[in-house]
Amino acid sequence: MFIENLKAMQMKITACIESSITWENKDCVSRTIFCETDAAYAGELTFDPRAFLVGSLIPAVVHGEGRAKTDKPIYPELYNGFLTNDSRLHVWCPRTELIFADLN
């Protein structure tokens, strides 16, 4: 899974960030996911692909993606959190595989 094409948009009453999620190993349609808020809170949006990584990991694991890739390195705290959550995901969905090895 690739997280790419990060964009920020400011409208009169709203602000939005979005990113493309492209599947690497599965024959799934690429998606654009976004986060939108009132324009007054535009400064609170995180313009960083790592923010989209957090929201994309569970679907990636469930659909059997082999890795997740962004153009920025993953913070150690975030990486360790992924490893902890991966061990919990195996309880709910035993056929999932660890996809976090390529993030560091």
Image (spheres, rainbow, N blue to C red):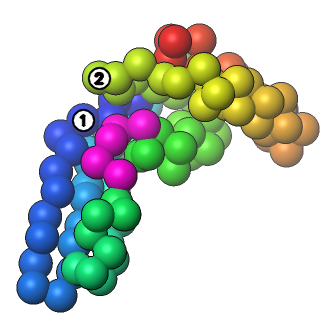
The image quadrant of residue 99 is: top right
Q: Secondary structure at mark 1?
A: strand
Q: Nearer the viewer, residue 83 or 37?
A: 37
Specify start and end residues of the magenta stretch as a single range. Answer: 46-50
**Would you name the residue on which mark 1 appears?**
4
Residue 10 is situated, as x and y percent measured from the top left of the image, at: 12, 70
Q: Residue at x 48, y 23 (%)?
A: 74
**In the drawing, what numbered circle is on residue 71?**
2
Give how far across and how far down residue 102 sits, in percent.
50, 12
Among the 4 quarters of the image, the one containing residue 36: bottom left
Is residue 47 a member of the stretch shown in magenta? yes
- Picture layout, residue 98 above or below residue 1: above
The residue sitting at the right extreme is 91
- Residue type at numbered disc 2: Asp
Magenta: predominant secondary structure element? loop
Residue 27 % position (x, y): 37, 35
Q: CA distance from mark 1 to mark 2?
A: 8 Å
Q: Nearer the viewer, residue 92 or 75?
A: 75
Quadrant location of the N terminus?
top left
Task: Tell me if residue 31 comes above or below residue 102 in the rendering.
Answer: below
Identified at 64% across, 27% down, the residue is 77
Question: Where is 93 relative to 68, above or below?
Answer: below
The three-letter amino acid code for the residue at tag 1 is Glu
Could you say which disc has been placed on residue 68 in the image?
Answer: none
Q: Is residue 8 left or right of residue 65?
A: left
| Label 1 with label 2: CB-CB less than 8 Å | yes
Residue at 52% of width from left, 12% of height from top?
104
